[in-house]
Image (cartoon, helix red, strand yellow):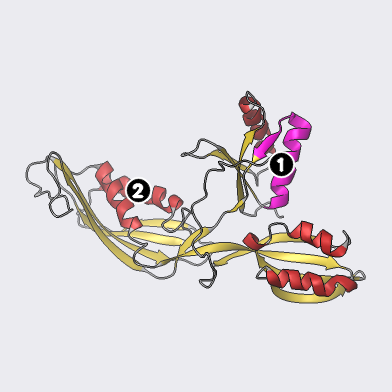
Amino acid sequence: MSGDAPTLIEVAIEPKSRGDEARLSAALAVIASEDATLTVSSDRESGQTIVKGTSEGHLDRTFDRLLREFKVDVSFGAPHVAYREALIRAVEIDHTYKKIFGQQPVGGVQINNGSLGGGQFARVRLLFEPLPRGSGYTFSNAVVDGTVPSQFIPGVEKGLDASRENGVLAGFPVIDFKATLLDGAYHDLDSNILTFEIAARVAFRQLKPRNVVVLLEPIMCLETATPDEFLGPVIGDINSRRGQIRSVEVRDAMQMIVADVPLAALFGFERKLASLTGNLAKATMTFSRYAEVPRSLPDDDPPRFPPAIGMRA
């Protein structure tokens, strides 16, 4: 897989032997420093170590290296695909954040008349627009009349930055969109950078009920070289994995199958290929693109990447 491929698979790991946490951390730091496609982080909820890589084989090689070179054996949870989320159309969100201290909500909504300075207040009007794949994220401030003072704008940016990393559908980052602050309002005493951060976070969450965000999955370009006698079974297996065959041609006396296949459907493919062909076929996969998860799937809204409570040896 190419070095500029995104991290596509993530796994929670822990050392099998108690007391090896420090050695594991040090070993992963060394490996990550030598492998730009490997990312190591800590899950904020579980505290577990999360390792992200470009493929199932990439992570397998990393774990093998931990044992072989650093003598650290690990248990790991089931691998999870690193999905993404994206907007499908532009939408404008106008949200007012109000809170008054020492007063109960009226009708489920906090009331603040803005006169006493005893609470929190911020209003943001944001325009969210999808961008072409690969464009990344941009923020623009279009406020020109001071309705949101300049010192509060970083709060809006911070709120959006945090929210887009956590997603709105399934906890995956939202990619390739532009957020523009169009307008807002503030209170001399009740507004600050934090209130605008909170207002931006809540406004972002309101994208979900507007049904403007979809889940994206990584699509891999799968190239499989197989002897002619196994061509039918191999193509059948690829089709069963939601694969779309691009081409089949003879190359070096082998049948070369080129297909687009969702990464989520490729777990265990290499083992199945070996079983179908008696280890005579070979496959390579490279990242192609992100595409919307088909809505017809039985589970088209996968859960947020969970802590790997049940670890595997």
Per the model, the C-alpha gap separating discs 2 and 1 is 35 Å
Residue 85 left/right relative to 226: left
Q: Magenta span has 119?
A: no
In primary-sequence order, the first of circles 2 and 1 is: 1
| Magenta stretch: helix, strand or loop mostly | helix
Q: Which mark is residue 62?
A: 1
Q: Secondary structure at mark 1?
A: helix
Where in the figure is residue 123, as x and y percent of width and height? 22, 54
Looking at the image, which residue sits at the far top?
A: 19
Judge left or right: residue 84 versus residue 51. left
Rendered view: 77 above or below 207: above
Residue lying at 78% horizontally and 34% vertically, measured from the top left: 68
Extreme residue in the left direction: 115
* Crowdedness near tag 1: few (<14), some (14–19) or many (≥20) residues, C-alpha within 10 Å: some
Q: Residue at x 38, y 56 (%)?
A: 139
Amino acid residing under circle 2:
Gly
* Quarter of the figure with residue 262: bottom right
Is 57 magenta? The answer is yes
Quarter the C terminus occupies = top right
The answer to whether residue 7 shows anywhere in this view is: no
- Magenta stretch: give its range: 55-75
Residue at horizontal 61 percent and vertical 64 percent from the top: 289
Residue 35 found in image quarter: top right
Q: In front here: 254 or 18?
A: 18
- Any part of residue 81 in sight: yes
Image x and y of residue 109, in percent = 17, 53
Q: Secondary structure at mark 2?
A: helix
Q: Residue at x 49, y 55 (%)?
A: 303
Mark 2 or mark 1: which is in front?
Answer: 1
Q: Amino acid at mark 1?
A: Thr
Across and down, in percent, residue 52 comes to 61, 46
- The residue tagged 2 is 159
